[in-house]
């Protein structure tokens, strides 16, 4: 898996980031499906260790990666695709103010079946101050310790 991630990253198709908390690996955020040209878009996927879930770690990480994608990389649009039953992931995009664009039927093949996903998106123009700044302002904190 690491070899594949490195290869895709070298080819500009993917950016994998690890999340650490108290000096240990607790999750990952990946910018994938990077497309240039007239689209300038990508999608973000993530996972977090259940022992640190609910502490603001993932919303902070997704906000930081989204800001990097918009400002450093120059992307215009970020999507997050989430299975409808994944309430914890749905809460992350809700907290960050991603726009709900509806459901894509049978989007990904997972666990031997085609699964529906809800689609959420943001464009760079929707967060001119940056997503991390907006998250900090709406959450009432500077992020996780």
Image (tube, rainbow, N blue to C red):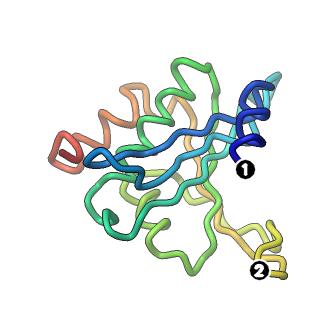
Q: Secondary structure at mark 2?
A: loop
Q: Residue at x 51, y 59 (%)?
A: 47
Name the residue carrying label 1: 1
Name the residue carrying label 2: 111
Name the front one of labels 1 and 2. 1
Q: How many marks?
A: 2
Q: Relative to the observer, which residue lies in front, 2 or 60?
A: 2
Residue 92 vs residue 52: left or right?
Answer: right
Please tell me whether residue 94 is drawn above or below residue 111 in the rendered image: above
Q: Relative to the observer, which residue lies in front, 16 or 37?
A: 16
On the image, which quarter does residue 26 sit in? bottom left
Residue 30 vs residue 95: left or right?
Answer: right
Q: Which mark is residue 119?
A: none
Please tell me whether residue 116 is drawn above or below residue 124 in the rendered image: below
Residue 73 in picture, x, y percent from top left: 61, 20
* Earlier residue among tags 1 and 2: 1
Please tell me whether residue 122 is drawn above or below residue 53 in the rendered image: above
Q: Relative to the observer, which residue lies in front, 142 or 46?
A: 46
Is label 1 in contact with label 2 (beta carbons under 8 Å)?
no
Q: Residue at x 72, y 50 (%)?
A: 1
Residue 34 in picture, x, y percent from top left: 74, 34
Residue 131 in picture, x, y percent from top left: 40, 36
């Amino acid at each position: 898996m690491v070899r594949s991630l490195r290869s895709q990253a070298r080819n500009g198709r993917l950016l994998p980031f690890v999340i650490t908390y108290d000096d240990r690996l607790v999750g990952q955020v990946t910018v994938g499906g990077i497309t240039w040209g007239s689209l300038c878009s990508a999608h973000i996927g993530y996972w977090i260790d259940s022992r640190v879930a609910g502490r603001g770690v993932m919303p902070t990480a997704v906000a930081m990666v989204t800001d990097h994608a918009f400002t450093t990389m120059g992307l215009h649009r970020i999507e997050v695709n989430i299975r409808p039953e994944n309430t914890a992931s749905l809460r992350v995009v809700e907290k960050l103010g991603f726009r709900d664009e509806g459901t894509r039927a049978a989007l990904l093949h997972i666990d031997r079946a085609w699964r529906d996903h809800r689609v959420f998106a943001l464009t760079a123009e929707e967060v001119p101050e940056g997503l991390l700044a907006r998250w900090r302002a709406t959450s009432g904190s500077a992020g996780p310790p």
